[in-house]
Image (tube, rainbow, N blue to C red):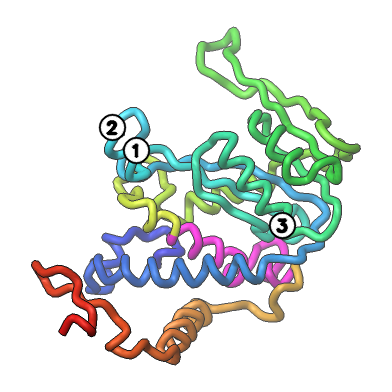
Amino acid sequence: MLVEGVSISSTSRLTGIQKSTIIRLLLDVGAVCAEYLDLKIRGLTCQKIQADEIWSFVRSKAKNTDDIGRSLSHGDVWLWLAIDADTKLIVSYYVGNRDAESAKAFMLDVASRLVHRIQLSTDGHSPYLEAVEGAFGIDIDFAQLVKFYGTTDADDRRRYLGARKTAVIGDPDPDYVSTTYCERLNLTIRRSDRRYTRKTNAHSKKILNHCASVALHVMHYNYVRVHSTLRVTPAMEAGLSDRVWSLSDIVALLEAKEREKAKKPSKPRGHRFYKPHGLQPLRRSDH
């Protein structure tokens, strides 16, 4: 249900399962999905990548967040997304701020997953300039689609007026300078992840829950959800999978992880430190 735009509260009401239990499961599954995506989405032979950012917030919007809240990662949070224009695969994602530091971390991650030169298209967000150069150097064809907004004579509402394609590095093909697929991906995220639906109270309350939800939805999009145009999943189109996954396959990853943890031998009790409530830690030799 969570990957079909249903909130935690609604899922709890429909299933009769406590919200705390659903959140714990989300955290566990999200961690497994993030680990799997980081391991498998590599060595890609993409040719055209589009990147964009999508806004949300944790607990409260930035204007309503105090210093204590900001120290807990409350406030505005941005999801950076990179999509392969041909296979529609989400190549990389990053949860952070909309600043230069996040842009650099995002672009370094994108570069680490590719094997050859690509053409990259982004919007006119200025942190991309330094971030792309730092991650790729000159071994890239990079262009920005700079959009213009303003008012018209008909009314005072701010409207889209047009865009300009600007080559930044290399020799990008103007015909493929676009962020259309990534912007469509933003819509998919907002419709499938309730935390990104505007004007609701289903927003994340903790940053860890937010990151876990993003990882689950990226996993579902790449491996489970059949793309309406491709007729297969993006992972299949990219050669990363030979079949359409089901949600039970994602659960199987979690079960395998738990079995792996159970097999690890525990340390002998004599090698541990004990801290009874209200007392100082005691060593075995102190007994």
Residue 8 x, y percent position in the rendering: 31, 61
- Whether residues under marks 2 and 1 lie with C-beta atoms below 8 angstroms apart, the answer is yes
Residue at the spot of label 3: 112
Q: Which residues are magenta?
A: 212-237
Q: Earlier in the sequence, mark 3 or mark 1?
A: 1
Left or right: 116 in relation to 249: right
Within 10 Å of the Cα at label 2, are there few (<14), some (14-19), or many (20+) other Cα atoms?
few
Residue at the spot of label 2: 66
Residue at mark 3 to residue at mark 2: CA–CA distance? 36 Å
Q: Which mark is residue 70?
A: 1
Q: Which quadrant would the N terminus be assigned to in this image? A: bottom left
* Three-letter residue code for mark 3: Ser
Q: Earlier in the sequence, mark 3 or mark 2?
A: 2
Whether residue 245 is in magenta: the answer is no
In front: 98, or 165?
A: 98
Residue at mark 2 to residue at mark 1: CA–CA distance? 6 Å
Q: Which residue shows up at 58% across the image and 63% down it? A: 221
Whether residue 213 is in magenta: the answer is yes
Residue 96 x, y percent position in the rendering: 50, 44
Residue 242 x, y percent position in the rendering: 71, 80
Within 10 Å of the Cα at label 1, are there few (<14), some (14-19), or many (20+) other Cα atoms?
some
* Three-letter residue code for mark 2: Asp
Q: Which residue shows up at 66% across the image and 71% down it? A: 40
Q: Which residue shows up at 75% across the image and 67% down it? A: 238
Q: Which mark is residue 150?
A: none
